[in-house]
Image (tube, rainbow, N blue to C red):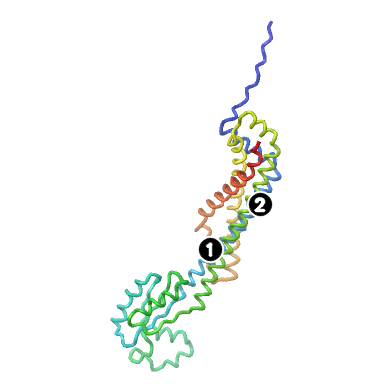
Amino acid sequence: MSKKTKQPRQRKSRTGISYFWAEGIHNIFLNGFMSFAAVSIILACLLITGSVTLISVNIDLNIRQLQQESEIALYIDENFTYTQARAMEKELAAIDNVDTVEFQSRERSLEDLRRQLGDDAYILEGYDSNNNFMRDGYRITLKDLSLAKQTEEEIKKISGVANIVVREDTINALVRARQVFQIVSFTLVAALGAISIFIISNTVKLAMFARREEIVIEKMVGATNWFIRWPFIIEGMLLGLVAGGLGALAEWGIYEKLVGTVTNALPAFTMAGFEEFAVVLIAVYLGAGVVIGVGGSVLSMRRFLDV
């Protein structure tokens, strides 16, 4: 009775996409501690960057609200009739940097002054619509506060403008505050992004170092650089996605806690709801995680592929 010949076990194809994914996942567990460290560092960087950015967005929101409240007060020549005064509105609205134009009659201005004086309003006794020292005017808000001076010069060219009151100190302070927070936000994004790429790069380097002999053999038998690269790119991408997903969830909790704390401490400070930018934030976190992960992987592989 003849013995059956033992057939050699067939190896699975090493060219399919499933192989790249399997190897990428294997690399993550091969260097478990460094993978955990990479996810933790990327997560921390995303949370710090995201939190600072969200704070900056809310500060910018409040600055915009203050900007709308920061008006230019315009007073019309007392010799102008009511009809002439109202006709100026179109000219004012036609100026590029003017956002809103609101007419304020002298009667309304007198009533506003009474309210502002409160208990001291008695000093205005005897003044009414027939005896009114106030002037017709306009309240104007601007699209860009930094252009307030140029806009003021354009307004002065309009016939009938007697006086313009611009709170330049307030406007300049708001412009400087916005610039500072924008610079801080951009700087942190760049710095923490670089740190994250450095960490993920070193994580992938460890995985490649552990498999350096296998990589050499694959190169010697004709494997292309991209065949070798893909598992490590997938490894970096998966690490970035995990960090991005966890970061988005953690940011939700942190932001909700921050909103409660800030609104209790500063009732006048407006905080946007998380749902207003939740979709964008999740997309940015996942996208940033992928970019950081893949970028770190690509940067780390060149030396190992020079065989």
Q: Which residue is mark 1?
A: 57
Q: Amino acid at mark 2?
A: Ile
**Quadrant occupied by the C terminus:** top right
Residue lying at 45% horizontally and 79% vertically, measured from the top left: 166
Seen in the image, is 161 located left or right of residue 27? Answer: left
Q: Residues within 10 Å of mark 1 (few under 14, many from 20)?
A: some
Is 60 on the left or on the right of 200, as rendered?
A: left
Residue at image position (57%, 48%) is: 291
Q: Residue furthest top?
A: 1
Q: Residues within 10 Å of mark 2 (few under 14, many from 20)?
A: some
Q: CA distance from mark 2 to mark 1?
A: 24 Å
| Mark 1 secondary-structure assignment | helix
Compare marks 2 and 1 and give the one earlier in the sequence. Answer: 2
| 47 lies above or below 137 | above
Q: Residue 210 falls in which quadrant of the image?
A: top right
Evaluate if marks 2 and 1 touch, with contact meaning CB atoms under 8 Å apart.
Answer: no
Identify the image quadrant of the N terminus: top right
**Residue 39 place in picture, x, y as percent:** 65, 48
In the drawing, what numbered circle is on residue 296? none
The relative height of residue 296 versus residue 224 in the rendered view (above or below) is below
Q: Which residue is pictured at 62% across the width and 44% down the height?
A: 297
The residue type indicated by label 1 comes to: Val
| Image position of 168 with respect to 42: above or below | below
**Foreground of the two, 263 or 302:** 302
In the picture, the disc for residue 41 is: 2
Which of the 4 image quarters holds residue 260? bottom right
